[in-house]
Image (spheres, rainbow, N blue to C red):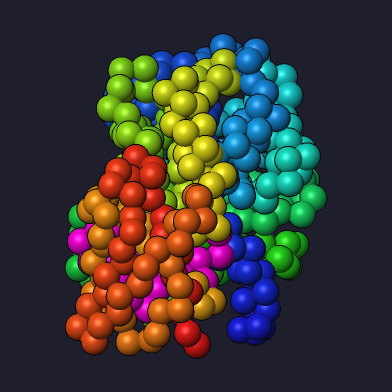
Amino acid sequence: MTTTTETQDRMRWFHQARFGMFIHWGVYAIPARGEWVMYNESIPAREYAPLAQRFDPRRFDPDAWAALAKEAGMKYMVLTSRHHDGFSLFDSKVSDFTAPKTAAGRDLLAAYVRACRRAGLKVGFYYSLLDWRFPGYFGGPEKDPAGWEQCVRYWHAQVRELCTQYGKLDLLWYDGGWVPWTRGDRDSKSAPLEDPWRAKECNAMVRELQPHIIINNRSGTERASVPEDYDTPEQHVTASTGGRAWESCMTINDNWGYCAGDHNWKTTTQLIHNLVRCASGGGNYLLNVGPKADGAIPAPSVKRLQEIGEWMQVNGESIYGCGVAPFGAGASGLTTAKGNTVYVHVFYWPGEELYLPPVKARLLSARLLASGDKLKVDQRPDRVFLRGLPRQAPDRLDSVIVLKVEG
């Protein structure tokens, strides 16, 4: 049985990191209409399979991916080893629909792992439980028990391969645990409420093979979730309750996989503010890129990650290892905290004077993080004023003020 201390030990790097790169990449990048193209356009498996014979990514450079993640200030990476379409980037003995057995002719996941380790980044695998190529998935254990059992055995076998072929892993990011025979029928008494994926059994195997790994909360169905180590709000920032670890996964535009027509890019300001929102709630930010079929990360993603990296070089200490502060920033922004240091992230620069809500503890000092310039603290029972600020914001994206708090 895993103890609380063991869980805290394996989660320590995760809480320190706060920022990671998510990568959705596979044969769906060829039609370039998002990672759900097979399902959304009702493409039969026999028509979808030939895409693998065209997936030979000549510009795939995992060292460049890792270098970009490091430049952005990220501490870990999570790559889709296999998405819902069933195409595996890794060498699998239980499938022929894999990168080594089709046009790529090599284990793309292995190259990614080596690049992460060279760069000093933690290694994460995404894995989808479901596979649209299996009729038994859509039938379920009641209508097609043999087909469903095939699905379950398949994902257990592939997870074992992931945990035994690549050395020490740091993170396993499950997805696709929902099942069509319970979706939209959450109150149905006939829908199985147990553990149809046998996720607890599979995760026990994972823990035995990879004792230090951390696992997200998506290995069960929507009705019978398996919580494991941390929660994963998607496309929104929502802190978990009760001290649960959490991580918001979000896209830079609207799609996870490469979509040539999606130009709805978030601004760098929006992305940095999301990162701060996660850290201020004690959570992580897993920011996605969707490489093209040739392996190149789209230029708008690269540009934004490099700009985040420039900000993180100056302000990273207000993110790494930080969590919930004992007081907020009022209307000006958000706060993060580490020890007796509170970081005020000023999104909306007020000019030469900044108001803060009441602070019970005594404020010992205040300074601008970027320049080190000291500020005057006027602390009153009902409010706090920080004075001597420059008229214009020192950083157009997010200016950070460092407060030392007594106790």
- Vertical order, 295 against 65 (above or below): above
Say whether residue 358 is left or right of residue 153: left
- Vertical order, 122 against 59 (above or below): below
Say whether residue 354 is left or right of residue 139: left
Point 70% across, 30% down: residue: 63
Where residue 261 appears, as percent x and y from the top left, is 31, 17
Point 56% across, 65% down: residue: 321
**Looking at this view, is 8 or 405 the one in front?**
405
**Looking at this view, is 51 or 80 the one in front?**
80
Point 73% across, 40% down: residue: 119
Let me know if residue 333 is in the magenta part.
yes
**Looking at this view, is 404 or 39 the one in front?**
404
**Is residue 195 in sight in this rendering?**
no
**Is residue 56 in sight in this rendering?**
yes
Say whether residue 121 is left or right of residue 53: right
Where residue 83 appears, as percent x and y from the top left, is 49, 38
Where residue 51 appears, as percent x and y from the top left, is 51, 16
Q: Which residues are magenta?
A: 319-338
Give residue 145's quadrant in the image: bottom left
Point 22% across, 78% down: residue: 383
Where residue 74 appears, as percent x and y from the top left, is 57, 46
So how many labels did they put on this image? 0
Give residue 255's quadrant in the image: top left
Where does the N terminus fall, quadrant-wise? bottom right
- Vertical order, 119 against 318 (above or below): above
Let me know if residue 8 is in the magenta part.
no
